[in-house]
Image: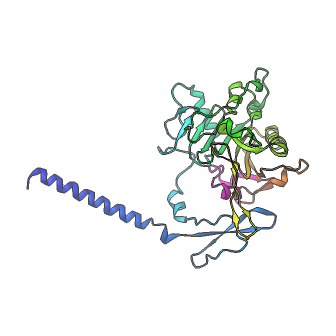
Amino acid sequence: MSTRAFKNVIIVTTVASSAFYAGYLYHERSLVNTLSLYRIENKPGLPLFGTTSVDSLSNVKQDEQSSCFHNLISTKISNLFSNVSLKNPNYSFFDSVNAATPIPNSNLPVVPDKVVPQYKNRVSQIMKYGFPSLDNIRSFDDYVLSYDKRNRVAHWVFEHITQDSIQANEKVDRSKCQFVPDESIHPLFRSDNSDYKGSGYDRGHLAAAGNHKSNQKHIEQTFYLSNMAPQVGKGFNRDMWNKLERYVRKMTRSYRNIYCCTGPLYLPKKESDGKLYVKYEVIGANHVAVPTHFFKVVVGETEEGQLDMESYVMANEPIDDKVALEYFQVPPHLIEKASGLLFFDGVAKNRLSKINGKMNNIEK
């Protein structure tokens, strides 16, 4: 046998072996044979969500009262990815950009060389306790977001708020801020001011402008439309939602650092046929989704390092301003189930001293 023919045999054998091994791994990791089902049961006092119990394959019948989460969730997926930390988005298939400039990926979102070195540290500060997800990350000078290209709004927006960052600066002029499209997003997937015109909805901030009024550039960057979502104006964006934003800023009096994650929800509603449907309006030529609800999950960090969490959900509709904010507090794990996000995944749950004002009973 010639040397060339011998090399060809080796190559074919190697490829065949690799294919066999890949098939073996696929069989071992098959989701079909290891599928677990999660059942959601509504509980009194929490009509929007449900709590979760695990069923075996022999008991998969769903209650008539079951909530919106009918999708089958595979525990095998959890096992495969249980060792993946969302604190380190070092995967090349995640799209990360800083404003209009693509960012190469590394252990944390990396900024281009032309950006001052302190900026990279700022992203690390904001995302200190982990990323809720790693889809289409965009980082700005003072906040970070994950963009939903299908719905033309963010999945989530993350902020690090301190007394310094909310301190009014006489040189900062909000009247100079203008709502502008985010040109870092492909034209097919971005929203435009024309989408909101005549829609009846406000361009509602997710990262609140009032959280960034110490610096002109910072506050201007909150007016990118990627940081906006259609919100009911009177009774919500200008009232109850604004009340929640002001409360979060007030928390800086008690905590050295505030870490705030805000985003939309698209929750189901039971129709006359007794079935649950997820329905929401879209506006404009770009079909910008109008969320049914919004969430805000906040962690306060004291001087001593104590961590407390508060989490809220509000319907995108006029709300009586006499209602106390505590009424909208929802257990954070229910928001995670509804949104598909993991909040503050870098914080062990037993590190949280309080959750929604109540002592955390998880053993340390």
Viewer-nearest residue: 31 or 292 = 292
On the rendered structure, is 306 left or right of 192? Answer: right
In magenta segment, residue 339: yes
Instruction: Write down the quadrant of residue 239 in the picture.
Output: top right
In magenta segment, residue 337: yes
- Residue pushed farthest left? 1
Residue at screen point 27% across, 57% down: 15
Q: In which quadrant of the rendered image does the C terminus lie?
A: bottom right
Instruction: Give the total number of marks visible in the rendering.
Output: 0
Q: Is residue 228 above or below residue 23?
A: above
On the rendered structure, is 294 left or right of 29? Answer: right
Looking at the rendering, the stretch of residues picked out in magenta corresponds to 334-353
Where does the image place residue 227, in percent across and percent down from the top left? 67, 39
Where does the image place residue 61, in percent across and percent down from the top left? 64, 77
Where does the image place residue 334, in percent across and percent down from the top left? 71, 59
On the rendered structure, is 273 left or right of 1? Answer: right
Where does the image place residue 322, in percent across and percent down from the top left? 91, 49
Q: In which quadrant of the rendered image does the N terminus lie?
A: bottom left
Q: How is the image coloured?
A: rainbow
- Residue pushed farthest bottom? 58
